[in-house]
Image: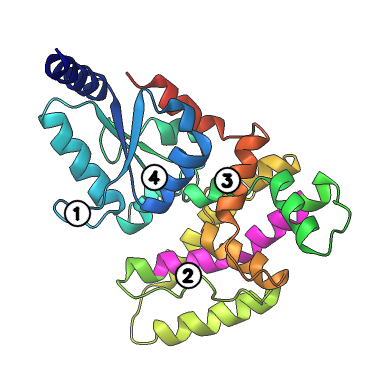
Amino acid sequence: MPEFKSFDSAITLEKRYALKIIVYLESEEDVSILADRWFFDFGEHIEFRTSADNFHSTGGYSGVRSRVKEDRENGIKAYGIVDRDALFSKKNWDILLETDDEKYKAKFPFGEYIHTLLRWEIENYLFDSLIVEEFLADHERGRKKRSNNVVLNELTQECCNLIFVMGACILLREYGLSIPGAGYCRNFDGEGIREEVDNFIQQRMKTLSGWEKFFSNICDRLNKFDKKSENNDSQFYSLLRIIDGKRLLERLKSKYKIADNPRFHFARKIREANRVPSEIKEFLSSLN
């Protein structure tokens, strides 16, 4: 009875598939990180999908929201994960700039079935100081690895260099103006960045008025993420909540003359070192 056996097998496979939980992500790159490098052992129960396809959406946070809504309406257990920068796109400054993680997590700006990441984007979870330094040491002619404290200080300083840039991006977004690319100011530091960004803003905002107070308030709120009184790793990981990870990576690539994009290397090494971010793991483990 081979035909019936094949039919039964097909039904069994369909039932097993139907029992899976679908988790929508913003992009194919996000799927490559979570499904192929971090949580491949969740595959029996969870399927990661990009929200972008030719029929429903072009991806991003809005695609995640619409795909989850549609699946839920059809009786499918679907959830989503979106970057914190989705709040930037929505101009939801109050939640975006919330420094208290518990208050932040109590909000569900994209619905109860969608987890909004604590950090700016999934790339920000790739900046594990131990993994980054291992890569840099091998990249620079096999030099000796530096202490974790030294590496954290460097990464924290690079984030601090970008605070003013992030303030400018929020200002421009508020007024509907285009923001500079990820490589903007990557070779500037400290006061050099402030001077460059000041000049840039003055040029972009010269026909507008009343923006100075908004910009000052935004910068004050961004600086609250720079928790200098805490230990190095807490300060760095706090800053990763409001620093664009692509901009941080561009600074490192420029500084260390890295030609390729190491993010998938970072992702794989993080899994091998058993350092996958607990926030995402706990969210996935809670799904049912």
- Circles 1 and 4: CB distance less than 8 Å? no
| Nearer mark to the viewer, of 1 and 4 | 1
Q: Which mark is residue 57?
A: 1
Residue 78 painted magenta: no
- Circles 1 and 2: CB distance less than 8 Å? no
Residues rendered magenta in the picture: 152-171
Q: CA distance from mark 2 to mark 3?
A: 30 Å
| Nearer mark to the viewer, of 3 and 1 | 3
Q: Going from the N terminus, do you reach mark 2 or mark 3 first? A: 2
Q: Which mark is residue 95?
A: 4
Q: Which residue is mark 3?
A: 267
- The residue carrying pointer 4 sits among few (fewer than 14), some (14 to 19) or many (20 or more) residues within 10 Å by Cα, namely some
Please name the amino acid that badge 1 sits on. Ser
Residue 161 painted magenta: yes
Quadrant placement of the N terminus: top left
Element marked by disc 4:
helix
Q: Which mark is residue 141?
A: none
Q: CA distance from mark 3 to mark 4?
A: 28 Å
Q: Is 210 situated left or right of 263 in this image?
A: left
Q: Going from the N terminus, do you reach mark 1 or mark 4 first? A: 1
Q: Position of residue 22 (x, y in %)?
A: 29, 32
| Nearer mark to the viewer, of 1 and 2 | 1
Q: Going from the N terminus, do you reach mark 1 or mark 2 first? A: 1
Q: Residue at x 48, y 32 (%)?
A: 39
Q: Position of residue 190 (x, y in %)?
A: 70, 71
Q: Residue at x 44, y 87 (%)?
A: 203
